[in-house]
Amino acid sequence: MKNKPITHKAVMRRFEKKFPGIGKEIEAELSKLRIAGKIAECRRRAHLSQVALAKKIGTTQSVIARMESPDYKDYKISTLLKIARATGGSFLIAA
């Protein structure tokens, strides 16, 4: 008998049963990971170093490094828009 693969939704249901409300916390963490990853992806696609991107948007390399970290929490829409413009990307807020 073959093992049936488990889906993301099934895992989330199990966690929600054991830990009510954890789904929202997990989704918040995943959102931060996505933002950090997209910043790094856009920067690399534009062939920019962290230093070069920082100069283009008027900040420092350490700020870019922090924003590319999944632990970062203080994203500002204005800064994300600057990054999108500097890297030739676009910026979309989706609910």
Image: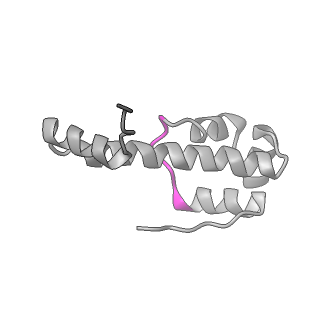
Q: Is residue 49 magenta?
A: no
The percent position of residue 71, horizontal first and vertical second, equals: 47, 34
**In this picture, which residue range is highlighted in magenta?**
71-77
Which residue is located at x 51 percent, y 37 percent?
70
Quadrant in the picture for the N terminus: top left
Horizontally, residue 53 falls left or right of residue 74, namely right
Q: Nearer the viewer, residue 16 or 53?
A: 16
Q: Nearer the viewer, residue 9 or 48?
A: 9
Q: Nearer the viewer, residue 16 or 27?
A: 16
Quadrant in the picture for the C terminus: bottom left
Question: Quarter-wise, where is residue 49 in the image?
Answer: top right
Which residue is located at x 63 percent, y 39 percent?
63
Horizontally, residue 65 falls left or right of residue 29, namely right
The secondary structure that most of the magenta stretch takes on is loop
The percent position of residue 15, horizontal first and vertical second, equals: 23, 38
Question: Quarter-wise, where is residue 81 in the image?
Answer: bottom right
Which residue is located at x 23 percent, y 45 percent?
13
Residue occupying the far right of the picture: 47
Q: Can residue 58 be seen at all in this image of the molecule?
A: no
Q: Nearer the viewer, residue 52 or 14?
A: 14
Q: Can residue 24 be seen at all in this image of the molecule?
A: yes
